[in-house]
């Protein structure tokens, strides 16, 4: 049996580990350093504008990844529906769905809210915040 269908990670938390492996991670900007008056500051990357990237891969077999660029702390919901409009899965981070500014990725492994594997088919992922309402089509192929 597969684990419950999601993992959530702030990409800026992953950058140092990725760079140690010698690669880049999701084209996220690297942390930069500035020196002012003899003090060195680390500057975390924050996007300039909101962007919901296309899910990848799509169609998918086991997992698919959605990337979000949030220029400021944002409260949003993310829900996956089946072709009949029934809710399959909902992102809930137990922090009242408020996410910090930064580069984020959300991985869905094709399970519903109860952890059961969903069948092959067409699904829709819907992002909703006070400023945006966007959707994308997903195809799960087994």
Image (tube, rainbow, N blue to C red):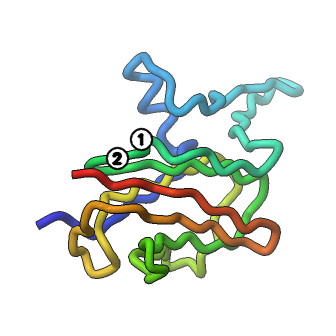
- Numbered-mark total: 2
Q: Report the side of 57 relative to 54 (left or right).
A: left
Residue drawn where x is 45% and y is 58% of the image: 8
- Which residue is nearer to you in this view: 43 or 91? 91
Is the residue under label 1 in contact with that under label 2 (CB below 8 Å)?
A: yes
110 up-or-down from 21: above or below: below
| Percent x, y of residue 141 | 28, 51
Residue 129 location, quadrant: bottom right
The N terminus lies in quadrant: bottom left
Residue extending furthest toward the top: 22
Residue drawn where x is 70% and y is 38% of the image: 45
Mark 1 surroundings: few (<14), some (14-19) or many (≥20) residues within 10 A? some
| Percent x, y of residue 57 | 42, 41
121 up-or-down from 11: above or below: below
Residue 82 location, quadrant: bottom left
Q: Report the side of 112 relative to 123 (left or right).
A: left
- Which residue is nearer to you in this view: 57 or 28? 57
Q: Which residue is mark 2?
A: 60
Question: SS at mark 2?
Answer: loop
Q: Which residue is mark 1?
A: 57
């Amino acid at each position: 049996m597969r684990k419950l269908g999601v993992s959530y990670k702030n990409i800026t938390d992953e950058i140092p580990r990725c760079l140690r492996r010698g690669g880049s991670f999701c084209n996220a900007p690297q942390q930069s350093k500035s020196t002012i008056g003899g003090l060195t500051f680390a500057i975390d990357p924050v996007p300039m504008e909101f962007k919901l990237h296309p899910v990848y891969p799509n169609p998918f077999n086991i997992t698919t990844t959605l990337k979000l660029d949030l220029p400021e702390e944002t409260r949003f919901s993310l829900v996956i529906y089946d072709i009949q409009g029934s809710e399959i899965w909902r992102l809930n981070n137990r922090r009242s769905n408020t996410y910090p500014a930064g580069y984020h990725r959300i991985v869905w492994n094709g399970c519903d809210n109860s952890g059961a594997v969903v069948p092959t088919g067409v699904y829709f992922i819907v992002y909703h915040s006070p400023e945006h309402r966007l959707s994308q089509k997903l195809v799960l192929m087994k």
